[in-house]
Image (cartoon, grey):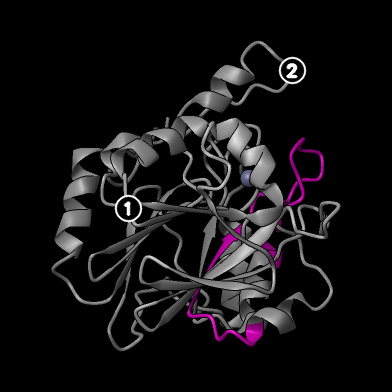
Amino acid sequence: MIRPHLQDDALLEDICLARSQPGLHLWWLGQSGFLLQHQGRHLLFDPYLSDSLTRKYSGTDKPHVRITERVIAPERLNFIDVVTSSHNHTDHLDAETLNPIFRANPGGKFLLAEGNREFAVDRLKVEKTWPLGIDAGQQIQVGGVIIHAVPAAHPQIDRNNRGQHHYLGLIVEIGGWKVYHSGDTMIYDGMAELIRDFNVDVALLPINGDDPSRRVAGNLNGAEAASLAFNIGAKLAIPCHFEMFEFNTSSPTLFEDTARKLGQPFRTLRSGERCTVGSHQRILTNPVAPA
Ligand SMILES: [Zn+2]
């Protein structure tokens, strides 16, 4: 089992410490889960902080064996302003993670893809009108941040019968930075051009799509993720969606090698590790030059 870089009390201490430090702070919480912090505001992307999938699939032909320990119990995240869900798959919409977070943050907001409202409120057992909804092409101001939605293709762009997207990427404007959380996605026509216009500072991208024989695909592989970061002009790329489940992971090596070749700044985090984007856009990245 992989031990997180910071876990439980140590992670909370680091989140607390960061509040007195300048810049935008970002922690990888495993899979596609990230915590953003800026000047006391906290936003969570797609947290998965339970063992619900491991239990659901135990004894089946697709066991979800966890390979990294959980970084924190969801109910301990009691300072969250906004939590988001990019799509309905359980590693991005987990009732056992989200409901404790909702209970711990009575004033917190939950933002989902409008096209997933019926499904999500049924899974989460929340009031139908309570979550905030957003669709691709829209923006919303919530919890002191502005959030834009763009399509994601997992593996294709998919819409409901009202034309609303089931898979979204989100671009969050927070404290002068723009952070793109792609959700689970492949490249689609016009994607790089669309996202380039947002002048993204940090791109959070999945890398587990490298092996078509794996049962869960529909995501970028490491080379595609690094190329997408480069093509949208992201100042920093951070890989995610690996080292959670044994059957659905990937080494970040292909991502890192491709990023170095392209001169794309990147930072590979361990689960529970923080990245701080400094007040002058100075970012501690992995070396770009070939080792
Ligand atoms: Zn996923």
Q: Amino acid at mark 2?
A: Asp
Ligand 1 sits in quadrant: top right
Magenta part mainly helix, strand or loop? loop
Q: CA distance from mark 1 to mark 2?
A: 36 Å
Where residue 98 sits in the image (x, y, percent)? 45, 38
Pair 1/2: label in front = 1
* Vertical position of residue 279 compared to residue 34: above or below: below
Where residue 2 sits in the image (x, y, percent)? 41, 35
* Vertical position of residue 246 compared to residue 144: above or below: above
- Residue under label 1, please give it: 80
Which residue appears at 22% of the width and 55% of the height? 15
Q: For the N terminus, which image quadrant?
A: top left
Which residue appears at 52% of the width and 39% of the height? 127
Residue 101 among those drawn in magenta: no
Mark sitting on residue 40: none
Where residue 113 sits in the image (x, y, percent)? 64, 55
Residue 138 visible to the viewer: yes
Q: Which residues are magenta?
A: 196-224
- Residue under label 2, please give it: 61
Q: Amino acid at mark 1?
A: Ile
Which residue appears at 31% of the width and 44% of the height? 106
| Relative depth, front residue between 16 and 249 | 16
In what element is the residue under mark 2? loop
